[in-house]
Image (cartoon, helix red, strand yellow):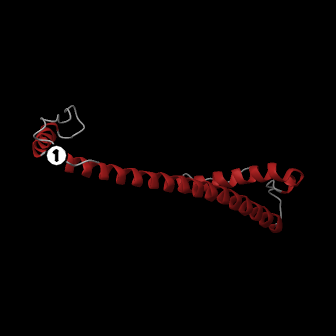
Amino acid sequence: MSSQCYPVAMDLGVCQLRNFSISFLSSALGKESASVRVDNSSSGASVVAIDNKIEQAMDLVKSHLMYAVREEVEVLKEQIKELIERNTQLEQENNLLKTLASPEQMAQFQAQVQTSGSPTGTAQPPVPAGPSTQSSGTSA
């Protein structure tokens, strides 16, 4: 089978997809594969039949790709949902820790953030200074 392929990437891709489609149809149709072969002396009707089969194969490939994409979108939506839930949980935890921290601990933390650039760097977490700096009567 010889078909003209173009050096432009898009045209080359279409040409390759068309060749793949013919091969795919040949294997899928079994005995009918003889009608899929390109014959230089074929009439216009057989060319139309071949084009129709190529179009059917491309539609089949498209439907499989769309199904795979839909599955991937569902997985990604679930991951986004889990990440949003985790983010919300961490924000609530952060707000709780901010309310429970003493002003001295917050000042020490801010100083560490400014010097290291991030709170999760090599800086150590603030250590409670003693009973006078902890909040009284508050429990989580």
Vertical side of 117 occupied by 4: above or below: below
Residue 94 visible (yes or no): yes
User: Furthest residue to the front?
Assistant: 137
Residue 81 x, y percent position in the rendering: 45, 55
Residue 36 x, y percent position in the rendering: 81, 56
Q: Residues within 10 Å of mark 1 (few under 14, many from 20)?
A: few
**Which quarter of the figure has residue 44?**
bottom right
**Which quarter of the figure has residue 84?**
bottom left
Front one among 38 and 113: 113
User: Furthest residue to the right?
Assistant: 31
Q: Amino acid at mark 1?
A: Ser
Front one among 121 and 91: 91
Residue 8 visible (yes or no): no
**Who's the residue at 75% across and 53% down the image?**
22
Total tally of numbered discs in the picture: 1
Front one among 64 and 10: 64
* Left or right of residue 93: residue 41: right
Residue 47 x, y percent position in the rendering: 78, 64
Residue 95 x, y percent position in the rendering: 25, 52
**Who's the residue at 63% across and 57% down the image?**
67
**Which quarter of the figure has residue 59?**
bottom right
**Who's the residue at 41% across and 54% down the image?**
85
* Left or right of residue 133: residue 48: right
* Left or right of residue 33: residue 61: left
The residue labelled by disc 1 is 135
